[in-house]
Amino acid sequence: MKRALIPFVIFIIMAGFLFKGLFLNPREVPSPLVGKPAPAFSLPQLDQPGKTFAPKDMLGQVWLFNVWASWCGACRDEHPLLVELAQSGVVPVVGMDYKDTASEAKRWLNERGNPYLLSVVDADGRVGIDYGVYGVPETYVIDKAGVIAYKQIGPVTLASLRDDILPLVKRLQAQ
Amino acid sequence: MMKKYRSGLAAILLLLFSQLGMTHEAEPLQSDAAVEAQVQRLATQLRCLVCQNQTLADSHAELAQDLLQEVRDMAARGMSDQAIVDYLVARYGDFVRYKPPLNKTTSLLWLGPFALLLLGGIGLIVMLRRRQAMQAELPLTAAETRQINELLK
């Protein structure tokens, strides 16, 4: 009787693992960049193409770096949250307009509101590769020393803001 | 006659211009055979992170094309396979390698099948031994002996 239970126990264990697997997100690839300095770049700004922005301009501040594009569907989902976040003034958000055209990007921001302190333009996606971007939108939390503390792949949600991003921002700001 | 020439000229011009249009696209292929061979070799070893179950060589996703171009640039600069893979791993993590490296997080993946094979083998041997012992231990009853003798007669 005991022996007959063995396959059943094995089945239960495997079912347990598979059940857990149902709730994992295969798109979430752990980023090796967390804990490393944000890769340096110097890119033109969307609104003032004559001016550039570099991550070191934000040294001393905790900031969010949000990769977006006007062609990106999921960016539409997170955009209202970012707008609200920007209005609250808790943390500055710098955008990176990824592989987009300036006119489309500007229209997109005009229609939906502009939550960004400024947006830089990564027209050919080179800086995106440096940041390990593979699915837009992606959001990085960067600390006062310019080190990436967190990376969110996919849209920012109310839950991820409340549970992960904002508590982390508060903690980093207090440092 | 003149007409013939003219159409011939037009054909040549057309060919020329279509070539012009194409040179831009095909440029990387012509640059250097060794570089291109390296790019092709690496393309089969690197993962397209958008499609996840395709290599860069198989994928038509835009990011895959960008990454290939990046690999091509690095190859043209004379970087080794290892240096290029390391560059991408530093940005995208081990997942970008189509063949995962053997390390702490992937040890179950690499060793799991062998562990299962070993477990199965041990189970099989134990089971066979037990069955053998069971068969050897059972002496024939008097009735069975009689039956066998009857059949063999």
Image (cartoon, coloured by chain):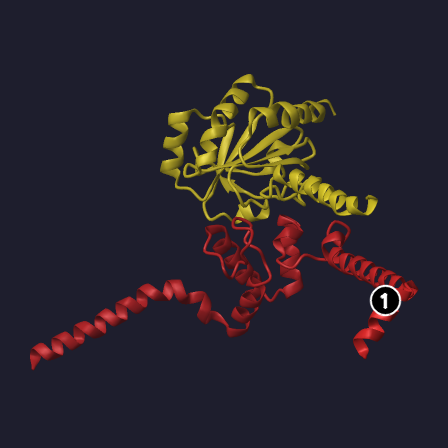
Chain colours: A yellow, B red
Residue A100 falls left or right of residue B64: left
Q: Residue at x 62, y 49 (%)?
A: B92
Q: Is residue B140 visible?
A: no
For label 1, the residue is: B144
A80 or B76: nearer the viewer = A80
Left or right of B111 in this view: A109: left
The x, y position of residue B29, in whole percent, is: 45, 69
Q: Residues within 10 Å of mark 1 (few under 14, many from 20)?
A: few
Tell me the residue at 53%/55% (across/down).
B67
Q: Nearer the viewer, residue A23 or A35?
A: A23
Give me the residue at 61% from left, 32% from top: A58
Q: Is residue B21 left or right of residue A105?
A: left
Quick check: A70 left or right of A169?
Answer: left
Q: Is residue B77 above or below residue A174?
A: below
Image quadrant holding the C terminus of chain B, namely bottom right
Question: In the rendering, at what x and y percent does residue A51 appear?
Answer: 48, 37
Question: Which sits in the foreground, B131 or B127?
Answer: B131
Amino acid type at mark 1 = Glu
- Confirm whether residue A79 shows in the render: yes
Quadrant the N terminus of chain B occupies: bottom left
Image x and y of residue A103, in percent: 36, 37
Residue B143, placed above or below residue A38 = below
Q: Residue at x 54, y 21 (%)?
A: A85
